[in-house]
Image: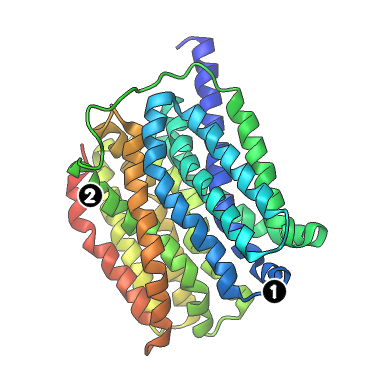
Amino acid sequence: MNTSARERHGRAVVAGLVVGCFLTWNVANVGAVADPLADAYGTSLAVVGLLTTALFVTHLASQLPSGVWSDRVGPHRVALAACAAGAAGNALLLLEPAVGPALVGRLVVGVGSGAAFVAGLDLVRAGGGTPVLQGLYGGATMAGGGLALLVVPPLTDATSWRAPYASGLALALVGAAVVLVVRGLPRVGRARRGVLGDVRLLPLGALQVATFGLAVIAGNWVVPLLERDGAGSAVAGALGSFVLLAGIITRPLGGALVHRWPERRAALVGGSLVTVAVGAFLLAGDGPLWLSALGSLLLGLAAGLPFSPIFEAAQRLRRDAPGAAAALVNACAVLAIVTCTPLVGLAFDLPGEGAVGFAAIGALALSALPFVRRLPG
């Protein structure tokens, strides 16, 4: 590879990482300051929660179309469109503290975040596509949400309720500026057939549900569960963050392991599923706080490892449509998050105060084990 090609590919990878960080920032930024937003809007926390639901609706709906267009016109163009949607939606959210316009703004931002996941991953593929680079992308997507939880609350001192939206707008503009320097990436073109009818991708979608999907669902409810076990709110928040933040480390680690021992990818994914289940069962048990904390850590660490082998497999299965294939696999997990997160919340009204929901998470992780055999070698 000549110097010009290396520079072009390097820019694509950097742009993909920035776009990936942008997408999860917008997923987490509202929840980070739910109380100030509820006060500004003059409404309840439940209504503020609808702002995240609205984002996920369009986030899900935009993924597969974004994958198709990424294959046809190039991921850098889709990434620019994603940043534009994120900027427009956050600009609308900054105008006035009213629930109606806020819901519309979040729907627009969701289009950007959904497209950003696909375009960012496809930019990394076009820039090299090694398991290590894809793992780094996975880490970047987890880091965006974690940084939002860390940075947005202090910003409220300077910008009040506008902090999550002003920061989202700024990051969208930074993402667009980085993507603009990407040039000369090859386009895949039209796929031989659509990915919706490709049954080979469905086992990969199930594995993504059982790792990323279950981790996000657990992350939404792990703090009240730990508080049930006697932890204070600050301690519960710190321990519960392991479920999501651990992926910053283990997603790149999973890519490195698959790159070093590609013949062991099935063992890596299978072992991760078992460990996710063990972590969920520890959280469901009525044990001491340290045991629940261990369960949170195990679940988070294990859920991140399969990211690279899952998406690398999807892109190899459909070399004629890598963007659409990755979009379909991830859309399975997003659909599970949208539908199952409220169901696990209902478990807190049952005996055990949430234990049944986390036991179900463990059982679902184990139920995906048969799909490990469908990973392409």
Q: 202 or 254: which is nearer to us?
A: 202
Q: Which residue is mark 2?
A: 203
Q: Position of residue 297 (x, y in %)?
A: 46, 64
Dot 2: element: helix
| Residue 173 point in image, percent of width and height | 66, 37
Mark 2 → mark 1, Cα distance in angstroms: 45 Å
Quadrant of the frame with the N terminus: top left
Residue found farthest to the front:
100
Q: Of the residues shown, which amino acid type is indicated by label 2?
A: Pro
Residue at 36 percent across and 34 percent down: it is 68
Residue 192 in percent (x, y) is at 23, 27
Circle 1 sits in a helix, a strand or a loop, which is it?
loop
What residue is rendered at 38% in x and 58% in y?
Answer: 213
Say whether residue 261 is visible. no
* Corner quadrant of residue 195: top left
**Quadrant location, the C terminus:** top left
Mark 1 highlights which residue?
Answer: 42
Disc 1 residue crowd, few under 14, some 14–19, many 20+, Cα 10 Å = few
Is any part of residue 125 visible from this angle? yes
Q: Nearer the viewer, residue 36 or 127?
A: 36
* 246, 29: nearer the viewer: 29
Task: Report which quarter residue 354 is drawn in.
Answer: bottom left
In the rendered image, residue 153, in percent from the top left (x then y), is placed at 71, 62
The image's mark for residue 295 is: none
The amino acid at mark 1 is: Gly
Which residue lies most toward the right here? 158
